[in-house]
Image: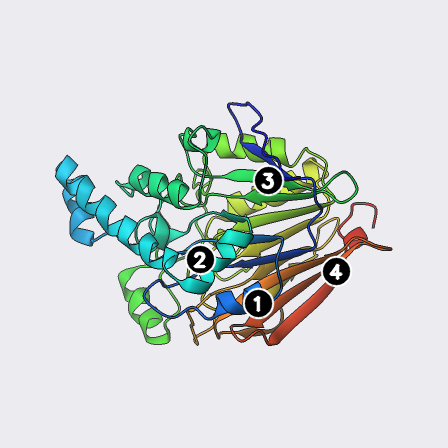
């Protein structure tokens, strides 16, 4: 029996979504609502127990002129109404996708956002209409009206729990937009060189105060990583392990990335797997140097968005894939519990796979 319980706390929303153990989890990102999305039909064939959306679930960028008006002190009700109408129209297009709509009727979804469904390409906390985006996002993904997630003042992060002890999955959905600082860019001369190779404008920010997550989200995350789980899936809208900084990734905020890795160690949080989106290509990343157990990041992007100019990544495992795709996590709870991490194309062909025993993601391994 499915039951939803909201644990009262000023720091987090913990949702016990189901007593039934998860076996099949589908996930993806980057779904342009103006184009066909055949991946949903392929996803449905696997009859997933859960679908995780990792951001750019629609492309609803606000007009630059609207942002400039708001920042210039012309943040009027009429302007807000225009922004709201625009964003809602993009979600309505996604809702109208037949195969997506069918899947939502039979399968629970959980979601976070990225820049294009948050507000504007690569934008962070300076987006002036972020609370409008938040309300529409939470309405679309059927967040209850009395949910504590709606009252959080610094983002849409949330955690979910599935299954009883011994088969419990914790899904942590981070918000890497609402409180994120502006990113550190190369100078104008270097930008011209980067434009020729299309390698992006960003550099790692050495500023100790440069933030990806706000203080309250960090406190919440510390609480979540202290809780028991047999598999922890941390959903990030952008790549966590990749070391390339030209485009958006946690590597642009190295102190924040280091802080999360250290927090996993401090809390003895075992069985962590990261999943991410954003890139418009898919890949496995693995880091095991100077860590008690290997960290994996499975990037799936996009549902119908593609990018052929794949960036370097020294932590990449196997070849990347730039065609339309989705991710699968297949959990085997019997004998030695293990997960299969898969990328499949929008016709359901297997593109890449890794099998990981859960006991290899352990401090005792």
Q: Residues within 10 Å of mark 4 (few under 14, many from 20)?
A: some
Residue hosting label 1: 283
Q: In this rendered view, identify the residue nearer to me: 347 or 228.
A: 347
Q: CA distance from mark 4 to mark 3?
A: 22 Å
Query: Which residue position is annotated with label 3?
Result: 160
The vertical placement of 123 against 145, above or below, is below
Helix, strand or loop under label 3: strand
Residue at image location 61% in from the left, 31% down from the top: 223
Vertical relation: 40 (above or below) 253: below
Q: Is residue 15 left or right of residue 229?
A: left
Instruction: Tell me, yes or no, whether the two marked residues, 2 and 1, touch with CB atoms within 8 Å.
Output: no
Residue 136 lies, in percent from the top left, at 34, 43
Decide: few, some or many residues near mark 1? Use Cα within 10 Å; few <14, some 14-19, many ≥20: many
Residue shown at 51%/72% (left/top)?
A: 346
- Provide the residue designation for mark 4: 356
Going from N to C along the chain, the mark reached first, 4 or 2, is 2
Residue 265's tag is none
364 relative position to 324: left or right: right
Q: Are marks 3 and 1 in contact (CB under 8 Å)?
A: no
The residue that mark 2 highlights is: 101
């Amino acid at each position: 029996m499915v039951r939803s319980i909201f644990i009262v706390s000023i720091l987090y929303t913990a949702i016990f979504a189901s007593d039934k153990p998860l076996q099949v989890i589908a996930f993806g990102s980057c779904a342009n609502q103006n184009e066909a999305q055949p991946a949903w039909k392929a996803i449905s064939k696997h009859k997933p127990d859960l679908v995780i959306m990792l951001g750019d679930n629609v492309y609803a960028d606000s007009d630059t002129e609207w942002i400039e008006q708001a920042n210039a002190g012309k943040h009027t009700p009429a302007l807000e109404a225009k922004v709201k109408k625009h964003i809602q129209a993009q979600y309505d297009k996604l809702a109208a996708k037949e195969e997506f709509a069918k899947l939502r009727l039979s399968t629970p979804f959980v979601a976070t956002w990225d820049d294009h469904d948050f507000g504007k390409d690569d934008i962070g906390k300076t987006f002036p209409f972020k609370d409008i985006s938040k309300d529409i996002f939470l309405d679309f993904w059927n967040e209850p009206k009395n949910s504590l997630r709606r009252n959080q003042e610094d983002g849409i992060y949330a955690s979910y729990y599935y299954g009883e002890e011994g088969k419990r999955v914790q899904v942590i959905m981070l918000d890497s937009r609402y409180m994120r600082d502006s990113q550190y860019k190369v100078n104008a001369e270097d930008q011209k060189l980067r434009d020729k190779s299309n390698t992006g404008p960003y550099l790692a920010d050495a500023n100790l105060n440069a933030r990806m997550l706000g203080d309250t989200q960090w406190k919440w995350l510390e609480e979540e990583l202290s809780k028991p789980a047999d598999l922890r899936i941390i959903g990030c809208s952008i790549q966590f392990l990749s070391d390339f900084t030209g485009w958006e990734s946690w590597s642009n905020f190295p102190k924040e990335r280091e802080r999360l890795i250290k927090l996993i160690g401090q809390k003895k949080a075992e069985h962590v797997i990261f999943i991410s989106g954003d890139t418009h290509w898919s890949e496995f990343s693995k880091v095991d140097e100077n860590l008690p157990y290997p960290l994996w990041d499975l990037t799936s992007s996009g549902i119908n968005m593609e990018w052929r100019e794949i960036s370097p990544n020294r932590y990449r495992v196997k070849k990347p894939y730039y065609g339309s795709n989705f991710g699968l996590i297949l959990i085997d709870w019997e004998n030695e519990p293990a997960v299969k991490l898969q990328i499949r194309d929008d016709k359901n062909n297997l593109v890449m796979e890794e099998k990981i025993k859960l006991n290899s993601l352990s401090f005792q391994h």
